[in-house]
Each structure stands twice: as C-alpha cells, then as structure tokens.
C-alpha cells in the first residue's frame, strides 16, 4: 500500500502527466453527462416500457447498448456512440488491404495517415445518415413522441441530433488521444462498459446475499474468485506474444559500428482483439429471422437462447474462424518481410524475402490456433456463468467483448502512464511483474 501511495505521488509530481489525466477525466465526465440527455420530444416513461419490450440488453442490440454505456437503450443524444466511427475505421482498414490506392496512402507516413483519418470521418457521416433514421424509426415508438412535428420532421430533427452527438463523441475521443492519456475511442467504449459494472455487481450481490438467489453468500464468494481468475486469464491472452528473433547486419561508418544487434518481432497470440466476437455476435442474430417460417422455426428456437448448446457451439466455431480471418487481414507477413529486408534485418536460418514471409505466416498460423480457442472459450463464458446461476447483467462481465475491452484498454493506459514514470526515473506502477513493453531497469 505504501508503494502504491508513493506511485500516486510520483504521478502527481509530473506536471504533464497530471494535466493529461485531469483532461481525460474532464472529457469522460462530459461524455457520461451527455449519455443521460434524451432526444427532444420524447416521453421517457413510455419510451422505457417500449424499449424493455425490444430486449435492448440481449443480442446485437445489447452489444450496441453496452458500447454506448446505456445511451442506446435510453434514446440519448449519444445513442449511436462511436460505433459508426468504428465501422468506418474497419472499412477503411480493409480497403487499405485490398485497394492499391489506399495501400499507397498507408505507406505515405503522417500525411497518408491524415488523409485516411479524413476519409474515415466522411465515411462516418455517411454511416450515420443511414443508422440515424433507422434508429429513430425502429427504437422510438409513435406513442412516446410528445411534440407534433409530423413523422418526417421528428425523424429529421432527431437524426441530425444523433449525427451531431456521435461526431461530438468522436471529437472527444480524438482530443483524449491527442491531449489526454490512452486511446480516446477505446477509452470511451471502456467507460461505457465500466459504468454498468457497479449496478450489475450490486444487483448480483443483493440477489445472492439476501437469500433470494441460488447458492447464497457462499456461491457469491466463489463467483468473485472465478471472476478474478477469468480476468487473469484474459490479461494473459491480451499480453501473450511469440517473440521471433531478428538479427540486423553490422555496418561500419567511420570509426563507429551500427547494427549487429538482435531484436524480436512480438507476434501476438490474439492479434485480432475483440473483433471476432463482435462479428460472431452479429451473425448469431440471423437465425432469429427464420422464426417467421414454419419449416425453419425449429432452427430459430435452437438459437433463441444464448445459453443453449447449439448456440454456443456455433458461436465458438464462428469466433475461431473470424479470429483466423481478421488476423490474416490485419497481419501482413509479406509487408513485415519487406520492411525487415529494407532495414538490413533477417531471421537467423531463414532466407530474406519470400522465405521469411512464409516463415512468419507459418508461425502466425500456429500461434493463432491456441489464441482462437482461448478467445472462443472466453466468448462463451457469459453463457456458462448464467447457467451456473449468475444473473444476466453480471454474467456479461465474466467474458466476451466487455471483459476483453476492459482488460485491453486498461493495460494500454497503464503502459502509457508507466512510460511517463520511467522517463522521469520513477519506479513504474508495479515494482515486479512488469507490463509488456517495459524494459528492465
């Protein structure tokens, strides 16, 4: 405890770090405040009843509601959150892999990055122009609308407000990245997830400790222990890397020698992050469309509950498949091999060029398998927790997208704070068990 207090003092003593943390907290508070401001002309009581019937806590709607910190289910001005921006970023990233013009733009350095960011913003506006009217028409019933603006007028005004709200959230995220601490967009998503954790934890505790839940206080203690173990497992998944040694050739310029050192390429076990789970959850919504047909109603019933065996088997397989797909899209062994060759580096025992690309691709294929299986198991953990007696709200924090985003963003933010401390010759956040990327002292 004394070491922790000393570290807090060291953080306060660094003026730049103190200002960055304060700026980040201020913008996060602005975001959370806006999440509770409803769209104009809506009766909140009628809206609440209507949205509860749509099950905004389950399926893809539940995922969107989680990413927005509950704003999606409350018809807030920030209801669409940063999801349109994330969707646009994914599209631009995929275009950079397959379209030569975008690939060339990625290679232009800082100027290319600014162009890609501008294209992402324009694409975000286009996505908002589609999602905004769809949200107003699908989520806000006519009986909840109190102002007589007509259907077109009401939809147009609410759509413009939703578009402005999402662009403002995107701006907050960019300001946090530039002048705050951590990745702003990721931090905003994490704050929305964490905002629901206290309520879910209190709900689970009151349900178990009052005797109304199954198992009573003893089971609640076991749940907390298992939850901590799952968090530790998620940290191990996020941090695990396969280090590939790279040797750089020696160069003698004048009386000085350059190169000749051995470094490592850290290939992540889970290079795809949480995207496979998001894609898999989106696809798992399609079987529900089959419920309107008599011949396929049995299939829809088998996938109607996220705790059913068939749902979890298919969900697990989809996560594994999408992990391989997204890793193949984001990790380019050929580009890594070319960059290594340009800088005079080579993998010991492997020829530069095509052989190096094939070697890296083989390693990525092998290390992705345990990462994909582990990711699939974590994705299915909420269903298992619910079967074991955990309520729906708290079961979501036993794994899946919410847990991985929390772990990944927190670790990334801690690493940035750690770098500031080490640059000022302070001890880091942890005296032992250094974070990934921290060098030995």
Image (spheres, grey):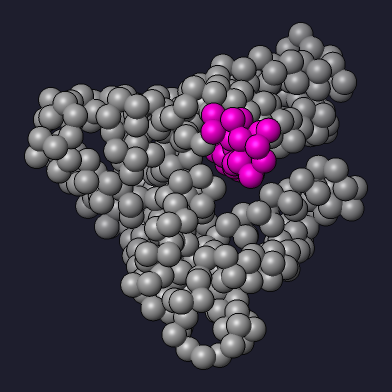
Q: How many marks?
A: 0
Q: Is residue 161 above or below residue 128?
A: below
Which residue is drawn at the image coordinates 47% and 34% (left, top)? 306
Q: Quadrant of residue 335?
A: top right
**Residue 238 picture location, percent across and down:** 49, 31
Image quadrant where one finds the N terminus: top left
Q: Is residue 287 above or below residue 86?
A: above
Q: Is residue 428 visible?
A: no
Image quadrant where one finds the C terminus: top left
**Residue 431 picture location, percent across and down:** 28, 32
**Residue 269 picture location, percent across and down:** 57, 24
User: Which residue is more in the foreground, 379 or 245?
Assistant: 379
Q: Is residue 120 visible?
A: yes
Which residue is drawn at the image coordinates 72% and 24% (left, top)? 248
Which residue is drawn at the image coordinates 39% and 78% (left, top)? 43
Which residue is drawn at the image coordinates 56% and 90% (left, top)? 149
Point out the stretch of residues depicted in magenta.
Answer: 273-302
Q: Quadrant of residue 162?
A: bottom right
Please identify the dominant SS of the magenta region: helix
Residue at the front extreme?
Answer: 294
């Amino acid at each position: 405890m004394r070491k922790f207090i000393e570290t807090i003092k060291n953080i306060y003593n660094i003026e730049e770090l103190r200002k960055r943390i304060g700026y980040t907290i201020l913008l996060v508070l602005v975001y959370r405040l806006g999440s509770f401001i409803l769209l104009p002309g809506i009766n909140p009581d009628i809206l609440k009843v209507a949205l509860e019937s749509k099950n905004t806590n389950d399926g893809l709607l539940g995922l969107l509601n989680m990413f927005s910190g509950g704003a999606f289910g409350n018809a807030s001005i920030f209801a669409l959150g940063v999801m349109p921006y994330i969707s646009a970023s994914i599209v631009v990233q995929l275009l950079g892999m397959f379209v030569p013009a975008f690939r060339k733009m990625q290679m232009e350095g800082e100027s290319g990055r600014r162009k890609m960011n501008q294209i992402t913003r324009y694409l975000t506006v286009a996505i908002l122009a589609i999602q905004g009217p769809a949200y107003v028409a699908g989520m806000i019933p006519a009986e909840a609308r109190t102002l007589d603006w007509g259907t077109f007028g009401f939809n147009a005004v609410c759509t413009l407000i939703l578009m402005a709200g999402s662009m403002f959230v995107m701006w907050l995220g960019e300001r946090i990245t530039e002048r705050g601490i951590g990745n702003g967009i990721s931090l905003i998503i994490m704050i929305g997830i964490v905002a629901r954790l206290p309520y879910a934890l209190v709900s689970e505790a009151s349900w178990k400790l009052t005797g109304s839940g199954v198992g009573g206080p003893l089971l609640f203690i076991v749940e907390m222990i298992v939850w901590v173990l799952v968090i530790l497992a998620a940290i191990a998944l996020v941090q695990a890397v396969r280090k590939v040694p790279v040797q750089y050739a020696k160069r003698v310029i004048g009386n000085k020698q350059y190169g000749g050192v051995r470094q490592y390429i850290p290939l992540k076990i889970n290079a795809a992050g949480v995207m496979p789970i998001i894609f898999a959850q989106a696809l798992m919504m399609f079987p529900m469309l089959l419920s309107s047909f008599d011949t396929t109603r049995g299939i829809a019933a088998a996938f109607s509950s996220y705790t059913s065996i068939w749902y979890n088997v298919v969900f697990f397989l989809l996560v594994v498949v999408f992990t391989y797909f997204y890793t193949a899209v984001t990790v380019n062994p050929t580009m890594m091999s070319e960059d290594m060759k340009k800088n005079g580096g080579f993998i010991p025992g492997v020829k530069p060029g095509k052989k190096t690309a094939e070697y890296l691709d083989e390693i990525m294929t092998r290390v992705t398998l345990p990462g994909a299986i582990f990711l699939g198991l974590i994705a299915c953990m909420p269903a298992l927790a619910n079967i074991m007696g955990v309520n729906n709200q708290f079961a979501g924090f036993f794994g899946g997208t919410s847990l991985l985003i929390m772990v990944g963003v927190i670790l990334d933010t801690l690493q940035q704070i750690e770098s500031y401390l080490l640059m000022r010759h302070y001890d880091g956040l942890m005296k032992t068990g250094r974070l990934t990327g921290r060098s030995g002292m």
